[in-house]
Image (cartoon, rainbow, N blue to C red):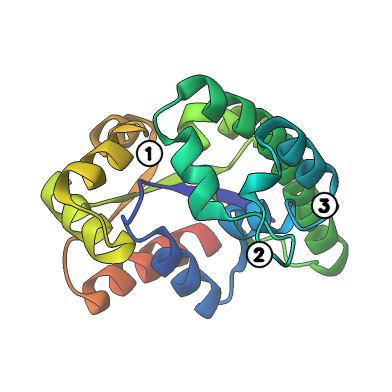
Amino acid sequence: MRVVGTTGGIASGKSLVLNTFMNLGAYGIDCDVLSREVVRPCSKAWWEIVNCFGKDILRKDLEIDRTRLREIVFGDSEKRKILEKIIHPEVKKRCMERIEAIKKIESNPNALVVIDVPLLIETGIQKEFEFDKVIVVYVGEETQVRRVMEREGVTKEEAKKMIELQMPLKEKLKFADAVINNEGTLEETEEQVRKVFKALSS
């Protein structure tokens, strides 16, 4: 079984690429989804976050208001590091549990597990997971800014600030074994994924 890490930047199209891999038959693990799972009410990470950031970040149903929390850590690198220190170990633990569960049911040596990790390069997690390959989903800066504005409903300046919190996509390309360019049409992106899937599964 081969384990592949995919990464990129905000609004680069990581979810599209992951879903395409899954439609082709790969197992998919989305760390953004896991990050929401590990902060469910009364979980270990939930208590730590509430203790650090206060009850004001909670909605009436006790779920963490992700928008409110993001606003708090957005311009404060120290608070952002505290939040990451709480969430990342829990996500890593759950991710490893998923991989082990897949290993128990999958006997095909060419089976592919694709893990979408937004901060794969920044956290150095590719060394811990020993990914067989690292795939970077790439878009140009102008496209990324436009997509962040559309998706998040923010201004151009706000979009740029959100993007600047992450490593530039051009820097991430240095760590890539394969690159999926998501500048074009849906069909063009899917065709690139099919080629990578075929190469990794043979």
Tell us which disc is closer to us: 3 or 2: 3
88 left or right of 106 in image? left
Separation of disc 3 and disc 2 at Cα? 17 Å
User: Which amino acid is tagged 2?
Assistant: Ala
Which residue is nearer to you in this view: 76 or 116?
Answer: 76
Q: Around disc 1, counting alpha carbons within 10 Å, would you say few (fewer than 14), some (14 to 19), or many (20 or more)?
A: some
Q: Around disc 3, counting alpha carbons within 10 Å, would you say few (fewer than 14), some (14 to 19), or many (20 or more)?
A: few
Give the mark nearer the N terminus: 3 vs 2: 3
Residue 36: % across, % down: 65, 57
**The quarter of the displayed image where residue 192 is located:** bottom left
Asked if residue 41 is positioned above or below residue 198 in the image, the reply reads above
Q: Secondary structure at mark 1?
A: loop
Residue 125: % across, % down: 60, 32
Tell me which residue sits at (39%, 32%) in the image: 175
Separation of disc 1 and disc 3 at Cα? 25 Å
Q: Secondary structure at mark 3?
A: helix
User: Which amino acid is tagged 3?
Assistant: Glu
User: Which amino acid is tagged 1?
Assistant: Ala
Which residue is nearer to you in this view: 70 or 193?
Answer: 70
**The quarter of the displayed image where residue 102 is located:** bottom right
Circle 3 residue: 97
Circle 2 residue: 111
Number of the label disc, if any, that sits on residue 176: 1
Tell me which residue sits at (49%, 37%) in the image: 72
Which residue is nearer to you in this view: 72 or 100?
Answer: 72
Tell us which disc is closer to us: 1 or 3: 3
Tags 1 and 2 touching, CB below 8 Å: no
Q: Which residue appears farthest toward the left when viewing the image?
A: 142
Residue 61: % across, % down: 73, 67
Residue 58 visible to the viewer: yes
